[in-house]
Image: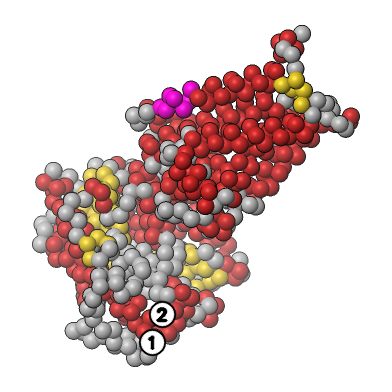
Amino acid sequence: MKIRDHFPKFRLPWWGSLLAAVLVSGCITLLALWCQPNALRSVLAVFRGQPLLIVLNAMPIGLLVLVFACLFRNVFFGAALVNLAVCLLSIANRIKIEVRDEPVFPRDFALLKEVGSAMGTYEIRFPWGAIALVVLTTLALAALGLLVGGKPFPVRRLRGALGRLLGAAASFAVLTGLILTVYASDGLYNSFRVSNAYYIPSVFNELGFPYCFCHQFTTYAVDKPEGFSRAEAEAWDEGGETGLGKDVNVIMVMNEAFSDLTDADVFAYTEETDPLPNLHALQSDPHALTGHVVVPGFAGGTANTEFDVLTGMQTNALSATTTSSFRVVNRNLDSLFRVFADDGYATSFFHPGDDWFYNRENVYRWFGAEETVFADQMTDLQYKGRWVTDDYMAGLIEEEFQEAVDAGEKLFHYTTTIQNHMSYTADKYGEGYDYPDVPLTVSVSEEVETLLKVYIEGARDADAMLGRLVDHFSASGEPVVLVFWGDHLPYLGDNQLAYAELGLEVALPEDDRTDPLCSYETPYVIWANDAAAEALDWDQATADLDLPENGRLSASFLGAAVLELTGRAGESPWFDFLNQLRRVVPVVQKKTYMIPDGTYIKDRDLDQWAPESGATGAEIRELIQQWRQWSYYHLRYKDIP
């Protein structure tokens, strides 16, 4: 005789079981919301103004209760299991936010081994009161299951195991369908009012953990490349020898929205009024390489450019759908930081913004940066309008460099600036700010004139930052290589408004342009001071890079080129491969490729590409496929302590 048969049973009809499932699901939802880091009353206040959130948070819990109620033939046993699982997951979310300022995502289930090893590195304060309440509620639901059962289903054929399995399968199918449709909807997700849409932990707290967790099942996807073999990719990664590079300091500065837009013929700047005098001077400097880097996106996606440059992977190749590269990073990755650190360098990352934005605080730890400094750790911040100035960041970089010199260390440093971030409205730098006129050969609207004045003021300050750093490192006897580039073109009005009024190709459909990738190109400079030029044998080292004549490179190849320039060929099989690929196809941008002579090839024409010299389309495709497969291995499997 079963233990539960000793207990008197009150048996609910099928509609009573369904009603009980609804009620207990609501209670479980409330308990899961109570387990979040923020107060339950603040969550409910948001829900009162947006009642659909109540349904979206309770629905998946209710369907899970039905799944297990069918399997156990008891709604309370099913509710007990769901309560324990959902609420403990909500508590895990609370702990993760408190420890790492990042919520729990579905993809975390694939990282249980890493989670277990990482827990020992954090001081975790377990919410024992919440845990105790969850356990007690689970036991209470299980006890109810011993006392309250359900009457047999009215349809005789469905009373046995078949009916239980069909009921569970149907409930689970509905849940799956909702996750792939309703919960996957970015339009619905973005329609809810939140205090800060860019701060993911805050969004989870305000919209509810159950809903946000379900939404994340279909976001930030990483597609498995065709033909992927983990063993084969692991073999590609073997080899490499540290300590081969030249001892030169490397300073990389990715400047917000930095571009040479003002070089277009439609602008009538003179030598005296040129907003980019330092960039132009370096274009003829014997110790400088200049060109354009092709970045992942237009007018946004700063973190995606960081990802491409530092890892050598490509954001645009991670998934067939749009994704955010920093949101798919959840493990230690190969990066420039690790290569330089293995050579004994001090490594650091600076950004005068919030550490939670794009999850940079965690991502740069996974990249291997020894030191990360964000706005809240910087002192005496200097602002121009609402953003920290490029000039302030130049001073901070100079201090970081001097500290490394004083400590007898070589420095690899990466800064992402923020001053020239949109929006480019007249009040950006304060009411009444006097912007220099923008000389044009065409007439533009007042709105576009304002956009240009404000944006170019920031570009002028970015160029001044470049000039300041060059002057500072020119005066140093320590060898320094400076890399300076823009993360993307500026956003100048809806539907490329300013670009259209200026008559620039950026506003045209890609197939109508003479340069199909002009909307993704920003200038870069790789410059060496005298000491670094001597240490590297600059002329020979730059000639050996085999850069294309037009100087264009995908952002994913910029970091690899810097490693080779500083003598680090042979240290990393991954970055060596990128330099090999760069020589065959310097630009890969979605479905467009550029070969070394500057010719662009569309993906649809690649298989028919058979030149008399150089790589065939089939060879290019094979290399790109290897790149994608190797990238997937790094993101999913490579174990870096």
Displayed quadrant of residue 455: bottom left
Instruction: Mark 1 and mark 2 in contact? Answer it, CB < 8 Å.
Output: yes
| Image-based side of 53 in relation to 552, left or right | right
The answer to whether any part of residue 484 appears in the image is no
| Image-based side of 50 in relation to 582, left or right | right
Q: Position of residue 592 (x, y in %)?
A: 52, 68
Upstream in the sequence, badge 1 or badge 2?
1
| CA distance for labels 1 and 2 | 8 Å
| Image-based side of 613 in relation to 481, left or right | right
Q: Which one is in front, 110 or 613? A: 110
The answer to whether any part of residue 302 appears in the image is yes
Question: Which element is circle 2 on?
Answer: helix
Q: Which one is in front, 375 or 283? A: 375
At a point 60% along the width and 70% down the height, the residue shown is 605
Q: Which one is in front, 202 or 166? A: 202
Displayed quadrant of residue 407: top left
Q: Position of residue 378 (x, y in %)?
A: 21, 50
Q: What is the span of residues highlighted in magenta in the rendered image?
A: 126-132
Q: Is residue 217 magenta?
A: no
- Vertical side of 529 occupied by 156: above or below: above
- Vertical side of 123 occupied by 192: above or below: below
What kind of residue is marked 1?
Val
| Image-based side of 187 in relation to 167, left or right | left
Q: Position of residue 622 (x, y in %)?
A: 55, 57
Of the 4 image quadrants, the one containing the C terminus is top left
At a point 66% along the width and 21% down the height, the residue shown is 144
Question: Which element is circle 1 on?
Answer: loop
Look at mark 2 in the image and give the residue it sits on: 498
Look at mark 1 in the image and give the residue it sits on: 444
At a point 77% along the width and 34% down the height, the residue shown is 15
At a point 19% along the width and 63% down the height, the residue shown is 391
